[in-house]
Every structure is written in structure tokens, then in C-alpha cells.
Amino acid sequence: MGMQLVFDASDESKLAETLASHGVTCEMFPMPDGRLGISIPTRVVEVVGESTMESILGSFTYIDLWSGGVREKVRHR
């Protein structure tokens, strides 16, 4: 299944750089209230792997539109 996610727009450049450095292609689009939407196709998630995608996105806080849940940024000590 693909991923439809919402991020804070202030994370756009870091997010784009992080995704590109891992070979993740996606559609990014502006949303109201300082938000940024991204859609990652199913094929990309299947190639990269769902657990790897979660690791890649772990440095960001975002809303997963499929689950409706907020994924908090992983804080490293």
C-alpha cells in the first residue's frame, strides 16, 4: 500500500533531501495552514520496504492519513 502523509511545511527541504538520498520518489504538494502533503506510491514502498520507510521518516513528525495517527519524531540520545 502507498503512503499518504502530512508534514509541517517547514520540514520540506530536509524531507525532500532525506527522501531523495534514499531513492524515494514521491509527489509533494502544499496544503493549508503551513502543511505539506506527500504521496509515496505503493511500488516505491514495496521496493524500499515498509520498515525502511518508517526508519527514513523517523526523523520527522507527521500524520499518516491511512491510519489517522500521528507519528512522532524519533529522538536520539
Image: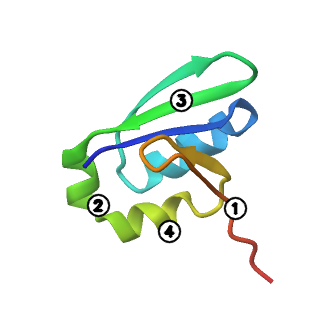
Q: CA distance from mark 4 to mark 3?
A: 19 Å
Marks 2/1 in contact by CB < 8 Å: the verdict is: no
State how far apart marks 2 and 4 are (Cα).
11 Å
Q: Residue flagged by tag 2: what amino acid is it?
A: Val
Residue where numbered disc 4 is placed: 55
Name the spot of residue 7 as percent of width and height, x first.
63, 38
Pick whichever of labels 4 and 1 is earlier in the sequence.
4
The mark lying in front, picked from 2 and 1, is 1
Residue 63 in the image: above or below residue 55: above
Q: CA distance from mark 3 to mark 1?
A: 17 Å
Q: Determine crowd level at label 2: few under 14, some 14-19, many 20+ residues with C-alpha closer than 10 A.
A: some
Amino acid at pointer 4: Ser
Instruction: Indicate the secondary structure of the residue bearing disc 4.
Output: helix
The residue nearer to you, when weighing 11 against 31, is 31
Against 61, is 13 above or below? above
Disc assigned to residue 73: 1
Q: Would you place residue 29 above or below residue 58 in this image?
A: above
- Counting from the top left corner in percent of width and height, residue 2 is at 29, 44
Mark drawn on residue 43: none
* Residue matched to label 3: 37
- Eye-nearest disc, 4 or 3: 3
Q: Which residue is mark 2?
A: 48
Q: Does residue 64 appear to the left or right of 46 in the view shown?
A: right
Q: Choose mark 2 or mark 3, whichever is in front.
A: 3
Measure the C-alpha gap from mark 2 to mark 3: 20 Å
Amino acid type for the residue under numbered disc 1: Lys
Identified at 53% across, 29% down, the residue is 37
Q: CA distance from mark 2 to mark 1?
A: 20 Å
Earlier-in-chain disc, 4 versus 3: 3
Q: Regarding mark 1 in the picture, which secondary structure is present there?
A: loop
Q: Where is residue 52? Give x, y as percent.
A: 39, 68
